[in-house]
Image (tube, rainbow, N blue to C red):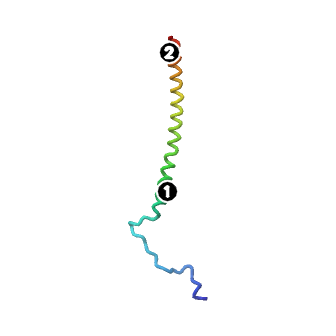
Amino acid sequence: MAEEMKNPFQENEPVQEPGPDVVKGDLGTIIVGVATLLDSAIAPMGKVVAQALDAMTVVAHQILDGVSTTLGEKK
């Protein structure tokens, strides 16, 4: 029974230090992390572009209304 109980602070196997060329983490984890960073950077830009397009639509509608009114008065 004494053999089964081990000190939790005792090292069972030597720890090998990774070399300088070793990338820690799974490739999928790295890809997900990069995608998350890109998504968080691009999402606000998408909202800005959508708002700009909405504003341009309003301005274009006003211009077309003005042109239509001007052409309608000349007839």
Q: Amino acid at mark 1?
A: Val
Residue appearing at x 46%, y 57% in the figure: 31
**Residue 71 circle label:** 2
Circles 1 and 2 in contact, beta carbons < 8 Å:
no
Q: Position of residue 10 (x, y in %)?
A: 53, 81
Q: Is residue 52 above or below residue 33?
A: above
Residue drawn at point x = 51 percent, y = 42 percent = 46
Q: Which residue is mark 1?
A: 32
- Residue 18 placed where, x, y %? 42, 70
Helix, strand or loop at disc 2? helix
For marks 1 and 2, give the CA distance. Answer: 56 Å
Q: Earlier in the sequence, mark 1 or mark 2?
A: 1
- The label nearer to you, 1 versus 2, is 2
Mark 2 neighbour class, 10 Å CA radius: few under 14, some 14 to 19, many 20 or more: few
Q: Nearer the viewer, residue 75 or 67?
A: 75
- Residue 40 position within the rendered picture, expressed as x and y whole percent measured from the top left: 51, 49
User: Where does residue 14 sit, x and y in percent of width and height?
Assistant: 46, 78
Q: Residue furthest front?
A: 75
Which residue shows up at 57% across the image and 79% down it? 8
Report which quarter residue 22 is drawn in: bottom left
Q: Is residue 37 above or below residue 23?
A: above
Query: Mark 1: few, some, or many residues within 10 Å (few <14, many ≥20)?
Result: few
Q: Residue furthest left?
A: 21
Disc 2 residue type? Leu
Question: Under tag 1, what secondary structure?
Answer: helix
Query: In percent of the image, x 57 and y 83: which residue is there?
Result: 6
